[in-house]
Every structure is written in structure tokens, then in C-alpha cells.
């Protein structure tokens, strides 16, 4: 194996890794913002309130991420009303199409994670809030959401890592993320083993960083639980 190629093109791989990090950061941030109201709607017992969020989650969890990327990138351009709208400067850019697809996908999974965490809070704590005379808004803001955030951290960290791996699909719409850059370099150098191995190591390093960050956040958020640790909720699937 010729690792001199790796040394030569390593800065380019780092450029691609930076694009991947931007994709994940923006999509996870926006996805988390969208996921919270969806999760709250899913906890409602009113079928008119939780019906639409259920269908949204069902669709984005039940279809492949690659299909969702293609629907946003290729599908939106098929409509003249979209091409003539103010959103076209965004929808014609592969980067922002990937952000939209990733955001929609991760918000569906994150909403289910949040819903599970909210419903995992003991009923006694909810009753205690009501006994103290808290309004529903106060109950969620002061007690339920902070508790749910502590419960959700392990599964949410896993979701971010899964999104990191899924971000490799962005290369299918001409984005030079880490995978896209690796494929471009391989087309020039014909060294797939060396380049893909290096790209895999970079993905692994980013994953380790995410795990370390979430361990520290979890330790801080759930410090009141003592050495036993936090309650974990199921991952995807």
C-alpha cells in the first residue's frame, strides 16, 4: 500500500471532514429544534393533535435516507412554482438540500427519542408537580423537560453518530464531504484501500469526539443520580 498518497491528500480529506461536520451540526441543531414540538404533540392523547406528527415520523423512519435526499434534491426542481419561489436559491444548492433532508430525517428519530424520554418520567413526579399547583407550561419547563433531557442523552448521542455515518450519502448529490472527497481522490490516484481506510479513521475520530462530549454532558446533567448512571432509552429500530 502506498501511504504517501495519504500524506499528500490528507489536507483534502480534512476539508471533506469539515464539510461533513457542518452538515451534521446544522442538521442535528435544526432537527432538535423541530423534534421537541413534534414529540410534545405525540404525547397528546388527542388523535387530532398527535395524528399528523405520527404520520410525519412514520414516513421519515420508514423510508431510506437516500430516497429522502433524492426527493428533496431532484424532486423540488420538478415544480415550476418552486423554481420561481424565493426558496429556489436554497433548494438549488446541494449542500442545503442535504441539510433539509438530514434535518427532516433526524427530527423524526429525535422526536421519538424525546417522546420516549418524556413518557419514561415516573407518574409520581408529574403528580407532585400538579400538587404544587404548577401549570402545564411550568411543569414542562421546570421539571419534565430537564428530566427528559437527562434521560435522552445516551440515545441522542447514538442518533448523532448514526447521522454522521449517514452523512456519507451527501456525496451522491455532488457534495464533497469526507466520502465525496475520498471518492474524488480515488478517481485520481487509484488507491481505494489507502484513502477509504484513512477516511474511516477520520470518521472514527469524529465519532469518538462525539461520544466523549456526550459522556461529559451526561455526567454533568445526571450527576444527581450518583455513580449508578442514567436511564437509557432504546436506540433506532
Image (spheres, rainbow, N blue to C red):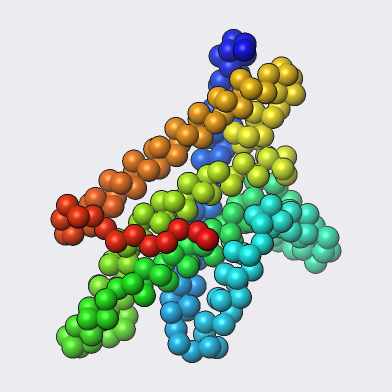
Q: Is residue 108 left or right of residue 93?
A: left
Q: Is residue 77 left or right of residue 189?
A: right
Say if 92 sits above or below 147 in the image. above
Counting labels gives: 0
Residue 84 visible in the picture: no
Residue 100 visible in the picture: yes
The residue located at (36%, 75%) in the rendering is 119
In the rendered image, the quadrant that contains the N terminus is: top right
The residue located at (54%, 31%) in the rendering is 200
Q: Is residue 142 left or right of residue 74?
A: left
Residue toward you, 74 or 216:
216
Q: Is residue 97 left or right of residue 20?
A: right
Say if 118 sits above or below 152 in the image. below
Residue toward you, 46 or 100:
46
The residue located at (57%, 82%) in the rendering is 51
- Where's residue 99, x and y in %? 60, 52
- Where's residue 21, x and y in %? 51, 40
The residue located at (55%, 24%) in the rendering is 198
* Quarter of the image where one finds residue 116: bottom left
* Quarter of the image where one finds residue 147: bottom left
Residue toward you, 230 or 37:
230
- Where's residue 199, x and y in %? 57, 29
Say if 216 sits above or below 17 in the image. below
- Where's residue 223, x and y in %? 18, 55
Say if 134 sits above or below 140 in the image. below
Amino acid at each position: 500500500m502506498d501511504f504517501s498518497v495519504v500524506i499528500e491528500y490528507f489536507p483534502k480529506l480534512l476539508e471533506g471532514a469539515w464539510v461533513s461536520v457542518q452538515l451534521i451540526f446544522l442538521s442535528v441543531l435544526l432537527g432538535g429544534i423541530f423534534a421537541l414540538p413534534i414529540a410534545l404533540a405525540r404525547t397528546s392523547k388527542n388523535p387530532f393533535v398527535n395524528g399528523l406528527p405520527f404520520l410525519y415520523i412514520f414516513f421519515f423512519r420508514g423510508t431510506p435516507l437516500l430516497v429522502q435526499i433524492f426527493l428533496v434534491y431532484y424532486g423540488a426542481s420538478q415544480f415550476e412554482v418552486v423554481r420561481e419561489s424565493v426558496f429556489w436559491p436554497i433548494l438549488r444548492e446541494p449542500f442545503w438540500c442535504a441539510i433539509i433532508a438530514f434535518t427532516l430525517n433526524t427530527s423524526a428519530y429525535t422526536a421519538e427519542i424525546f417522546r420516549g424520554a418524556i413518557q419514561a418520567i415516573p407518574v409520581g413526579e408529574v403528580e407532585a408537580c400538579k400538587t404544587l399547583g404548577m401549570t402545564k407550561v411550568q411543569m414542562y419547563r421546570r421539571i419534565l423537560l430537564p428530566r427528559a433531557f437527562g434521560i435522552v442523552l445516551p440515545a441522542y448521542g447514538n442518533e448523532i453518530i448514526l447521522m454522521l455515518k449517514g452523512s456519507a450519502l451527501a456525496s451522491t448529490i455532488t457534495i464533497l464531504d469526507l466520502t465525496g472527497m475520498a471518492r474524488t481522490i480515488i478517481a485520481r490516484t487509484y488507491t481505494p484501500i489507502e484513502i477509504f481506510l484513512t477516511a474511516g479513521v477520520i470518521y472514527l475520530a469524529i465519532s469518538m469526539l462525539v461520544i466523549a462530549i456526550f459522556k461529559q454532558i451526561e455526567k454533568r446533567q445526571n450527576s444527581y443520580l450518583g455513580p449508578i448512571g442514567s436511564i437509557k432509552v432504546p436506540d433506532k429500530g
